[in-house]
């Protein structure tokens, strides 16, 4: 899990592969860490559930959210949290 979800180089290469818009516009450390958090949540979801369809969102367990937030801190202490999609929530 550490290598796939918390390693900066793994997440960076995944962002480059996906041409991640969050990483393209990251100008501050806060933006960079936010883009890494987003990539780490996506990595977890893909590993656990595979590729999801549009609107299908899955919650990330609190233990994983805690690890990701500890690794990629928000300097303001503000986090977006889970935003439900249009599809079923599991």
Image (spheres, grey):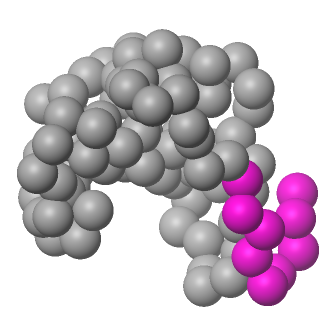
Whether residue 34 is visible, yes or no, is yes
Give me the residue at 23% from left, 71% from top.
21
The quarter of the picture where residue 86 lies is: bottom right
The quarter of the picture where residue 53 lies is: bottom right
Give me the residue at 57% from left, 59% from top.
50
Q: Nearer the viewer, residue 58 or 46?
A: 58
Q: Quadrant of the C terminus?
A: bottom right
Q: Tell me if 29 is positioned left or right of 6 in this view.
A: left
Q: Where is residue 59 drawn, in percent x and y?
A: 75, 48
Q: Where is residue 71 drawn, in percent x and y?
A: 39, 17
Whether residue 1 is visible, yes or no, is no
Give me the residue at 54% from left, 16% from top.
67
- 38 vs 9: above or below: below
The quarter of the picture where residue 84 lies is: bottom right
Q: Which residues are magenta?
A: 82-90
Magenta stretch secondary structure, dominant: loop
Q: Is residue 16 magenta?
A: no
Give me the residue at 15% from left, 64% from top.
25
- 52 vs 55: above or below: above
């Amino acid at each position: 899990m550490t290598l796939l979800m918390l390693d900066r180089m793994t997440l960076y290469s995944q962002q480059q592969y996906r041409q991640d818009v969050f990483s393209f516009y990251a100008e501050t450390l806060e933006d960079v860490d936010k883009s890494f958090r987003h990539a780490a949540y996506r990595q977890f979801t893909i590993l656990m559930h595979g590729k999801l369809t549009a609107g299908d969102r899955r919650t990330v367990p609190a233990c994983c959210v805690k690890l990701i937030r500890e690794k990629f801190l928000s300097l303001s202490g503000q986090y977006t949290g889970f935003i439900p999609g249009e599809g079923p929530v599991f």
